[in-house]
Amino acid sequence: MGKIRRILSRAFLTPLWDWIQVEVTTRCNASCLYCPRTVYGRKWPQRDLPLRVFERLLADLPRCQHVHLQGWGEPFLHPELFVMVKMVKEAGCRVGTTTNGTLMDKELSRKVVEAGFDVVAFSLAGTGPLNDRIRKGAPARKVMDGIRNLGRARGNSPLPEIHIAYMLLTSSLEEIRGLPQLLRGAQVSQVVVSTLDFIPHSDLEKEMVQAEEEGVLSLLEEVSSELDSQGVQLHHWLGASRNIPWPCTENVLRAVVIGADGKVSPCVYTNIYADEGKEWRGGREKSLERVSFGNLEEKRLMAIWNDPAYSAFRSSFSRGALERFCVDCPKLNETFKQKGTKRRTR
């Protein structure tokens, strides 16, 4: 009966969330140099989201279009990931994940296809030796093996869509030129390029790529054109494309993040946790501030979403008085950066 009620609810309810991102685990089998879990080391908690907590989402999933099972860890390490996928699919949502690709052997690929994943994205930060240095434990060769395994398991089916989540860093900037050759014949349909917007250590500031840097946008355009000829779309938020209709690229007005401990945050960058952790913004050191408006252990997601504090956070974007943790965030689009000068001090 629960499944029938969710299907009927979906038929009559307007979607409230474009996506819900669920951090199923904080554990990982790789050690990427730019990842906060690598930088913070022993301060980083190691936990899996309990299935009983995940189940508390089900009543509200009819208001969501897509559930992305991924956070600051490797999703396929969670022993009950496929149980979660089944629940999401039964609720009528699209489901996806982002993986480092190292576990995607033939058997796992078969399970992923049978489970009904809609999207599986593989992470890269280069196309050769620099990727392997930066993404320790997740060499490009092994990632590509995983992509090909999934492509073969998928066969003639269009699903899951195979994407690349590409981290563009200053030290490996030129390696992106090798992406069209690397992906040739790999059944990848989309590449999403991100930049290092969360800086967990001052040594990493130099890795943050800016649209204003000479040749960056033309390089991306060149690679995009070559990929397009192969039927692969490339997307990025650099330059003019940053002028999106949302306050930020994290879509905080129509998306939500659930941490592996059940806490609900506006985005992945407010769901970073390590005792006494630091971050760097604009060359300045700041204490790490995790932001949560409630926990699924205690309340349903809808109740947390409608909590006065969470509602005030979302309305701050229309008032132009942004919360302190959003004011200087590099994920803000330019319009809201200007509005954010009226910093809230509470």
Image (cartoon, rainbow, N blue to C red):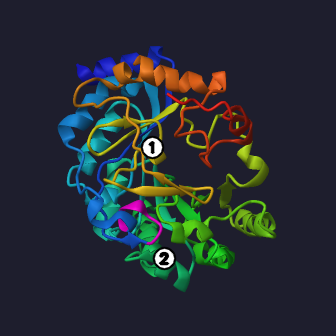
Which mark is nearer the camera, 1 or 2? Answer: 1
Q: Which residue is mark 2?
A: 134
Q: CA distance from mark 1 to mark 2?
A: 24 Å
- Could you say which disc has been placed on residue 270 in the image? 1
- The local secondary structure at tag 2 comes to helix
- Which tag, 1 or 2, sits closer to the chain's start? 2
Spot occupied by residue 318 in the image (x, y as percentages of width and height): 65, 23
Residue 15 visible to the viewer: no
- The local secondary structure at tag 1 comes to helix
Amino acid of disc 2? Ile
Q: Is residue 232 left or right of residue 124?
A: right
Amino acid of disc 1? Thr
Spot occupied by residue 287 in the image (x, y as percentages of width and height): 44, 51
Residue at left offset 28%, top offset 60%? 43
Let me know if residue 285 is in the magenta part: no
Residue 118 visible to the viewer: yes
- Label 2: few (<14), some (14–19) or many (≥20) C-alpha neighbours in 10 Å: many
Region of the chain picked out in magenta, as a range? 33-38
